Image (cartoon, rainbow, N blue to C red):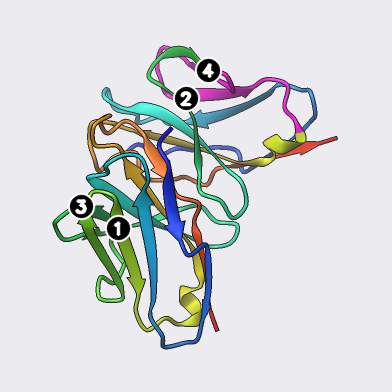
Amino acid sequence: LAKTTQPISMDSYEGQEVNITCSHNNIATNDYITWYQQFPSQGPRFIIQGYKTKVTNEVASLFIPADRKSSTLSLPRVSLSDTAVYYCLVGDPNNAGNMLTFGGGTRLMVKP
Amino acid sequence: GAVVSQHPSRVICKSGTSVKIECRSLDFQATTMFWYRQFPKQSLMLMATSNEGSKATYEQGVEKDKFLINHASLTLSTLTVTSAHPEDSSFYICSARDRLAGGNEQFFGPGTRLTVL
């Protein structure tokens, strides 16, 4: 299974754009990249998923370079409520045993 | 959207007792459910994969006789922590995949906080 590496923590201020990068050097051909958000004492919440290039939804964008060895979650204009832990997972969505290994995550602190 | 519930949300019990945690998919059928454990300030760790109508698959290091998993229907999986001890105190989270939508996304429950005195 592809291992992921993320910064342990990041600080930002309200209104700024935040970019969190995840390294996954041994990503496999069939693997997708998925990001989750987790607030304290809650289950993780799906943010975005992608395979290559760029994916955008109503809350975030995901940038994946051509070699797919890394990915960047971009949160536009963060607010205090975006303070959470963000996890990057890599795996084959068609394999029931994949995409179940959570790395350390990135603890984002948004300050006023 | 797909909703997964857990019950109870928190439980406090005495050492040596057993605790059952329920995980339900409310608006979809889940052939497979997953159970995770999360200690404070740490990441989620997969404990076991629960398949409807068959035995659960446990991750290395997880005692199957201590953490009993039953997945009797497509919408319910239960985790029973038997003879709980203080070191079992943790945040237990389940997730489920929508059988009809394919294996693309996990939907997580809100978690159950277990405190063993």
User: What is the spatial separation of the Cα atoms under label 4 and label 1, in whole angstroms?
Assistant: 32 Å
Residue at 38%, 33% (x, y): give it: A90
Q: Chain of mark 1?
A: B
Residue beneath label 4, please? A57
Circle nearer the viewer, 4 or 2 = 4
On whether disc 3 and disc 2 are found on a single subunit, the reply is: no
Q: Amino acid at mark 4?
A: Asn
Q: Position of residue A17 (x, y in %)?
A: 71, 21
Element at label 2? strand
Which region is colored magenta? A57-79
Residue beneath label 3, please? B51
Residue beneath label 2, please? A70
Element at label 4? loop
Q: Position of residue A57 (x, y in %)?
A: 53, 17
Q: Position of residue A103 (x, y in %)?
A: 47, 45
Q: Which mark is residue B77?
A: 1
Residue at 69%, 40% (x, y): give it: A83
Q: Amino acid at mark 3?
A: Asn
| Viewer-nearest residue: B23 or A4 | B23
Element at label 3? strand
User: What is the spatial separation of the Cα atoms under label 4 and label 3, in whole angstroms?
Assistant: 32 Å
User: What is the spatial separation of the Cα atoms under label 3 and label 2, in whole angstroms?
Assistant: 32 Å
